[in-house]
Each structure stands twice: as C-alpha cells, then as structure tokens.
C-alpha cells in the first residue's frame, strides 16, 4: 500500500495527516472547522483514499492558518505516498454536477505544482468560514502534492454546491491520476523518465 504520513507543528497549528492511496475512502477528520471537515470527508469518500487529518490551530484568531496548513500537510502526505510516481495514470479529470452547479476539475500529477482557480462566490462566508479560504486550501494542497490543478466552476448559484463540487471534482480526478496503470505499472509516465522535477520525493512507505 502507498501510505504517506506528515506531522506539521508551527506556532500557529499542530497537524497530523495520513493518507493511503490504495484505501477504501475512509475518513477520520477533526480540524475544528466543521465545513472543512465535511469537505475533507467528501475528498476521502469520492477518491477512495483513506484520509486521517487531526488539527489544532489558532481558531480564536481566524480559520486561515488551519485551513492552509491542512492543505500543506495533506499535500505533503499525498506526495510522500506517491513516491517516484511509478506506474500511475498521472492525469485525471472530472465534471461534477450538483443541482444547479457544474464544476470541472483536471489535474496532472506531474510534480510541477500550479493552480488555475476559476471559481467565484457571491457570499463572503459559508457558516463561519471565509469563502476566500477555499482557494488557499487548494493552492496549498496542489503545491505540496505536486499537482498541476485546474478548477473551473462553469455555472452555479449556491455557494455550498460550488465548493462541494470542487472538492468532489478533485477527489474523482485524483482517484484517476494516482491509480496504477496495469499496462505500465513499472514505468514513470513521462518521456523524461522521471516526475521528480526539482522536488525531492521520498519513497512511498510499504506496509
């Protein structure tokens, strides 16, 4: 199994994140931010990646540090679990309808991080969470997982649906990208022969 585990401690947050890319979509999430917990549960369920994420942060200030740092930690865990990225499909895409909303997500697990975020909100908050923080989470996750990630909300009115379809789209696209291609399970999917780029990627933990 391809497993990654990261412990991140700063003056602002303490986070333990673990992923199993070959899991069943199980989730143990406790960030202290209810809406973020719900989104990470969706990420696990629809990617079939087992995700554990336990966080303590300075929520008395705002939700920014905890949101961003969970993205960093989970991204690092995914990158660690991918190791040298041998045998993966590499690319994934999903177009997710959710009632009146339609969102498209495409990604390349290329180890060349980049985020295109074409998502707009009509409200500043969902519950107590600032909607601007969702871009921060996706940026942190893509950067640390080594993903070229494009997210575009094609249309929609309900802000909850827009966010949730973005996370579900990431989940489905990520599931495709990290699955092993049985026809090329021993090869890196690149003519360069490597997807390590300039980042040093530790080998996946075997269990």
Image: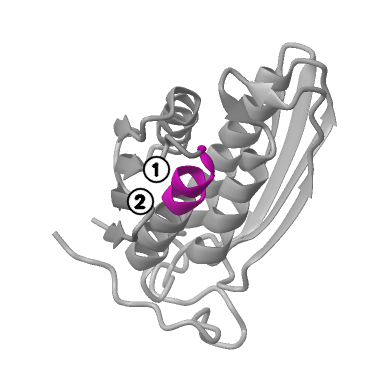
152 sits left or right of 10 in the view: right
Of 126 and 143, nearer the camera is 126
Whether residues under marks 2 and 1 lie with C-beta atoms below 8 angstroms apart, the answer is: yes
Which is more N-terminal, label 1 or label 2? 2
**Residues drawn in magenta:** 62-70
Instruction: State the residue at coordinates (46%, 55%).
Output: 178
The quadrant where residue 28 appears: top left
Crowd class of label 2 (few under 14; some 14 to 19; many from 20; radius 10 Å): some
149 sits left or right of 50 in the view: right
Q: Disc 2 to disc 1, how far (Cα)? A: 7 Å
Q: Closer to the observer: label 2 or label 1? A: 1
Residue 165: x, y in percent? 65, 28
Colour scheme shown: one colour
Residue carrying label 2: 13
Dominant secondary structure (helix, strand or loop) of the stretch shown in magenta? helix
Residue carrying label 1: 58
Residue 187: x, y in percent? 45, 76
């Amino acid at each position: 199994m391809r497993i990654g585990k990261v412990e991140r401690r700063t003056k602002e947050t303490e986070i333990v994140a673990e992923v199993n890319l070959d899991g069943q979509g199980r989730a143990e999430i406790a960030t202290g931010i209810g809406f973020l917990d719900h989104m990470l549960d969706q990420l696990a369920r629809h990617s079939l990646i087992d995700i554990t994420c336990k966080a303590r942060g300075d929520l008395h200030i705002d939700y920014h540090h905890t949101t961003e740092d969970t993205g960093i930690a989970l991204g690092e865990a995914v990158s660690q679990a991918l190791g040298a990225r041998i045998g993966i499909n590499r690319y994934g895409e999903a177009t997710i309808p959710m009632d009146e909303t339609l969102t498209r997500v495409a990604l390349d697990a290329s180890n060349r991080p980049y985020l295109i975020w074409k998502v707009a909100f009509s409200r500043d908050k969902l519950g107590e969470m600032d909607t601007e923080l969702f871009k921060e989470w996706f940026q942190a996750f893509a950067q640390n997982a080594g993903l070229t990630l494009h997210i575009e909300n094609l249309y929609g009115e309900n802000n909850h649906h827009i966010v949730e379809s973005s996370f579900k789209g990431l989940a489905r696209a990520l599931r495709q990208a990290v699955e092993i291609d049985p026809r090329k399970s021993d090869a890196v999917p690149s003519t360069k022969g490597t997807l390590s780029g300039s980042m040093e990627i530790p080998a996946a933990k075997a269990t």
